[in-house]
Amino acid sequence: MTSPTSTDKAVLSRHDLETRRLAAETIAEEAGALAIDYFRRRDELTIEMKRDPQDVVSVADKSVEDLIRKRIAEAFPEDGILGEEHGLQHGTSGFTWVVDPIDGTSAFLHGLGNWCVSIAVIEAEDPVVGVVRLPCDDETFSAMRDAGATLNGRPLHLDSRKTLKNALTGIGANSHIPPKMAGALIEGLMATGGNYVRTGSGAQMLAFVAAGRLVGYYEPYMHAWDCLAGYCLVREAGGSFTDFPVAGDAILKGGPVLAAGPGAFDDLKALADRCEPLRHG
Ligand code: IPD
Ligand code: CA
Ligand code: CA
């Protein structure tokens, strides 16, 4: 028997990604259906506080993540899994799933439909699959490395004529940063003639960048589960993102998240850099 050629290996590796992308789409739809069932009876849920009253969680987040972890373990028992609610379990295959069962929990619990299920797969630190499912809008954003991004099966391609000035930019902020920094970002964006949107779900807004609804997204402090699916979507639609370290324990740490289309990336990055000194008060 001859050893596999580099073409054989490339075919195998593409197959590995395709099976995971398909599984991520199916799992995100099933998880989204469970989540929307909780959403419809949210008045019955007990709200638990995490860091502060803006950072909350309920049984919905935990049981949606349980379902996602179960499905991944059944289909890919050798893959690692990191989920916001239940932490990191290492795998042996070289693939790690990075999951936010409900991104936009505050919106969810207050009755806004701006929340999503976010599922990424990383390989050698690269987000190779990204799926964001918005159950309230029946939308699935899906991407795979070198295979493009889609919205409900329709290909997404970013328009380089969109800029901070002529389009909308997503800005996110949480209690990890001083209010002054959030204020400076909004002020700086508006001073350039642009304007901002914040839906309450960073993963959704990154998917919106991939779809061209927002020209860019910046949030000074988020986690891997908030951004990696969106990063894969944006890259595959023709945009760029700043590095989010995921090697070793770095995957558990928070950091800045920035992604944008080709006509806005440099300007959004320059704005973020100008506001960076305010991070520490
Ligand atoms: C949050 C949302 C929010 C962003 C926060 C995230 P969660 O995630 O994405 O838009 O501003 O930084 O933590 O808690 O709803 O999963
Ligand atoms: Ca989140
Ligand atoms: Ca979450």
Image: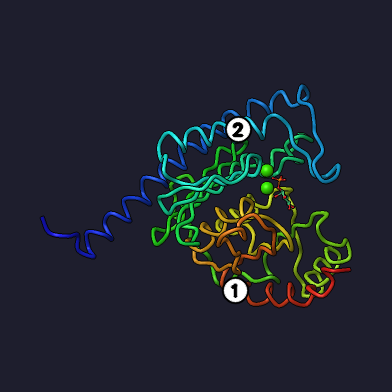
Above or below: residue 241 compared with residue 147: below
Label 1 crowd bin: few (<14), some (14–19), many (20+), radius 10 Å: some
Badge 1 element: loop
Give above or below for 214 relative to 185.
above
Of badges 2 and 1, the one in the foreground is: 2
Rendering coords of residue 246 (x, y %): 57, 61
Q: Nearer the viewer, residue 201 or 195?
A: 201
Quadrant assignment for the C terminus:
bottom right
Residue at position x 19%, y 63% in the image:
5
The residue lying toward the viewer, choosing from 171 and 89, is 89
From the top left corner, tell me how far across and down residue 86 is, in percent.
63, 39
Lower position in the chain sequence, tag 2 or tag 1: 2
Count of number-bearing discs: 2
Q: Quadrant of the N terminus?
A: bottom left
Across and down, in percent, residue 141 comes to 52, 48
Residue shown at 55% from the left, 56% from the top = 211
Label 1 CB, ligand 1: below 8 Å?
A: no
Label 2 crowd (10 A; few <14 / some 14-19 / many >=20): many
Q: What's the mark number on residue 64?
A: 2
Front in this rendered view, residue 194 or 182: 182
| Amino acid carrying mark 2 in the image | Val
Q: Quadrant of residue 160?
A: bottom right
Q: Is residue 235 left or right of residue 182?
A: left
Q: Are marks 2 and 1 in contact (CB under 8 Å)?
A: no
Label 2 residue near ligand 3, CB within 8 Å: no
Question: What amino acid type should be assigned to the residue bearing mark 1?
Answer: Gly
Assign a secondary structure to mark 2: helix
Coordinates of residue 156 in the picture (x, y in percent): 48, 57
Q: Quadrant of residue 177?
A: bottom right
Task: Residue under label 1, please give it.
Answer: 263
Residue at 47% across, 44% down: 152
